[in-house]
Image (tube, rainbow, N blue to C red):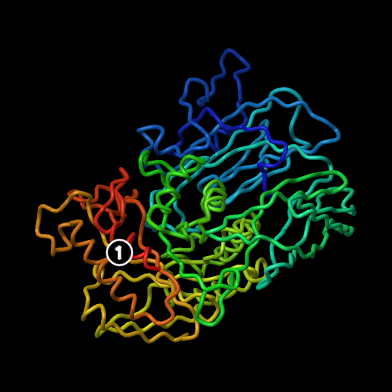
Amino acid sequence: MINVQSRNLTSLNGDWQVIIDPLGAGDWKEVWKEKKPEKKTDFIEHSFDGGPMLKVPGDFNSQLCELTYFEGNVWYKKVFNYKSDAEKRLFLHFGAVNYLANVYLNGEKIGSHEGGFTPFQFEITDKVKNGDNVLVVKVDNRRLNNGVPSAGYDWFNYGGITRDVNLIETNNTFIEDYSIQLKKGNLNNVLGWVKLDGTKAKQKVTIKIPELNKVYKTKANDDGYASVEFASNFSLWSPQNPKRYKVIIESETDVVVDSIGFRSIEVQGTKVVLNKKDIFLKAVNIHEENPLKGTRAHSKEDALLLLNTAKELGCNLVRLAHYPHNENIVKEAEKMGLMVWSELPIYQFMQFSDSVVPQKMETMLKEMVSRDKNRSSVIVWSLSNETYPGTPNRNEALVELTQKCKTLDSTRLITNVINSQSYTNNSFIVRDELYKYSDLVALNEYIGWYLPWEGKPADVTWDISFPNKPVFISEFGGEAVYGNNTKPTDEAANWTETYQEQIYKDQIEMFNTIPNLSGVCPWLLFDYRSLGRMNQLYQNGYNRKGLLSEKVEKKKAWYIMHDYFKTK
């Protein structure tokens, strides 16, 4: 179900007991059964008692020093008390667990989930008992060749129960899901639906927007589905006016309250158009990491640190790379007037030819879209980043996924991010079949860092195979250590601020040569942890492409980007 914050919640956040299981012995020892000695000669070779505690939500890597670089199994245990009610149903909801989760209640497995960045739930109405209940979760953050993402990626693999865990109590028939958004390309007409779940699914449904004196009535069919279509005079959501309305969805047996903004986002020719007006996307890339703590970001406070810094830079869009981020950052962005680019972790080294991978991709897509489809801040569904045309089944799998995304939600822009363009003789040649199906030509280019300039930035030429689409530079930049300017500043190997600053000056000069440019997005806001970065003089396990250090210190390139955004 969506909008869990408006439900009847009991939080299971807080201290959880854990067993660290690097050998994976917990499965054959059946840790979840919590066996106890019955005879004097019995002994049990595992126990949650006497072991460490971990905070949930939170990654386990940053909480115990022995787990800093750990990839493997950690067993979590929480005891909760419940009093059952025959008129109620009970669900166990996880905001996210990275990466594989096996969930056990009172010694019985109730389900599994794969994917580290999207929510999932299990109904436990018939499994919960009066009094104390024992919940055990096996978390495995090991990277998988056929996982999403695959085994190789350029960010820190924070494992654990990284987002909220809640018990959700509902009536026997409840409002499971809904979509209340403007019809594509329309500024007044809502086109959506409400879905009920339960034995009494055929009910009257009412949608109220008190501020507009709007009351809309419809009726769910036997399957619990009610179509929604009405018009009103909305004050439209935008970065300048992040207006949201209290929206009340009522059935005969349930009420859900949401705060929803209404806006239109589309492509018209070579322009990105918000509420029928051209908009230039002034963006920055953000990882889901609190730089000051070196932890997976999850809280409202984490979100505000990241988003306020993006606002100070002059952004109107944040690209939440390279996976769906937590709900707090999406909702806080909506309040602040920041548009959101949400992305699936379909990244380099994906095994598209493995038969299970496309299904995993589709499941994650559905979970991402389902959670945030009513958030007006979300304007882009990005389905992949830096995949390669020569990878077996890559084109077929991503074209099919794009089409499925359009079926799920046609109201937002859809794209795939590419970095396979060629750059020779100071000319970009941009060719990729995926652009045929994308609303944006989104590309990552690191000229000045991974590739040297082959001429003057102002003289770059472009040959783009889809010339009638907006172009978005989704990544560019270079690495620098804050405060490092003592060595020669014209050599990349010295990681100087001045070298990075020059990259940004040259890039901005080149932007004037790009046809149909609709936005730019530097990589990235903060230096962030990535174990593949092994230069021990300058990187020390950090990707140093941030405009700010992990201590929130502004590098010289920050000021270049800040001044550029002021002009747009």
Residue 387: which quarter of the image? Answer: bottom left
Which quadrant is home to the C terminus?
bottom left
Element marked by disc 1 = loop
Residue located at (24% from left, 52% from top) = 534
Residue located at (58% from left, 72% from top) = 402
- The x and y percentages for residue 268 are 56, 79
- The x and y percentages for residue 373 are 64, 59
496 or 30: nearer the viewer: 496
Residue matched to label 1: 477
Above or below 117: residue 379? below
Left/right of residue 540 with respect to residue 252 in the rendered view: left
Residue 170: which quarter of the image? Answer: top right
153 or 169: nearer the viewer: 169
Residue located at (67% from left, 66% from top) = 408
- The x and y percentages for residue 179 are 72, 59
Confirm whether residue 145 shows in the render.
Answer: no
Q: Amino acid at mark 1?
A: Gly
Left/right of residue 538 with respect to residue 277 in the rendered view: left
392 or 373: nearer the viewer: 373
